Image (cartoon, helix red, strand yellow):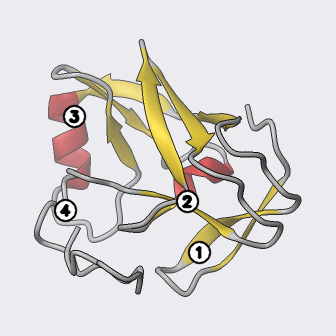
């Protein structure tokens, strides 16, 4: 479920990204990332050897494989993101940290991911950590 109009388009950060089609007020729920709930063990097997993955850890035992999910699966990382993820039970909600302008790419800070320290960051923001 996506509450605000978004579009998928080429991103200067990485591949394709998610862009606001209209202004999104700060602190508003943008929507929920959809996908298949799987075990962490299965998630690690699916991620092995891939440079692009669409997995979000929900807990120590389960993950969300968003490979076949909605547009929000393509949220790119930024060290100075304009949105954040909130995990509630087995749902991954996306909220705007601040007002997001029409046409602006919606980004989240991956913080720790399966790529932790092993993937170059392409966000280009001041204060970029250089790696994800």
Q: Callout 2: few (<14), some (14-19), or many (20+) C-alpha neighbours within 10 Å?
A: many
61 horizontally vs 16: left or right: left
Q: Earlier in the sequence, mark 4 or mark 3?
A: 3
Alpha carbon distance from label 3 to label 1: 26 Å
Local secondary structure at mark 2:
helix
> Looking at the figure, which quarter contains the C terminus?
bottom left
Locate residue 71, reporting x and y percent: 67, 52
Pinpoint residue 97: horizontal percent, then vertical percent. Answer: 56, 47
- Disc on res. 74: 2
Q: Residue furthest left?
A: 117
Q: Earlier in the sequence, mark 2 or mark 4?
A: 2
Instruction: Report which residue position mark 1 lands on.
Output: 16
Question: Nearer the viewer's eye, disc 3 or disc 1?
Answer: 1
Whether 34 is drawn above or below 128: the answer is above
Contact flag, marks 2 and 1 (Cβ < 8 Å): yes
Q: Position of residue 5 (x, y in %)?
A: 85, 51
**What separation in Å lies between label 4 and label 1 (alpha carbons)?**
18 Å
Ranked by sequence position, the earlier of labels 2 and 1 is 1
Q: Residue at x 35, y 67 (%)?
A: 79
Residue contact between numbered discs 4 and 1, judged by CB atoms under 8 Å? no
Q: Residue at coordinates 52% horizontally, 34% vertically from top-left?
A: 35
């Amino acid at each position: 479920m996506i509450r605000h109009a978004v579009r998928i388009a080429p991103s200067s950060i990485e591949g394709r990204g998610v862009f606001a089609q209209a202004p999104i007020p700060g602190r508003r729920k943008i929507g929920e990332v959809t996908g298949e709930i799987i075990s962490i063990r299965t998630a690690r097997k699916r991620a092995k050897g891939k440079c692009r993955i669409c997995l979000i850890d929900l807990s120590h035992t389960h993950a969300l494989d968003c490979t076949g999910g909605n547009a929000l699966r393509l949220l790119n990382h930024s060290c100075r993101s304009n949105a954040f993820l909130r995990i509630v039970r087995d749902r991954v909600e996306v909220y705007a940290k601040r007002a997001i302008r029409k046409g602006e790419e919606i980004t989240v800070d991956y913080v720790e991911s399966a790529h932790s320290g092993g993937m170059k960051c392409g966000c280009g923001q001041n204060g970029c950590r250089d790696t994800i």
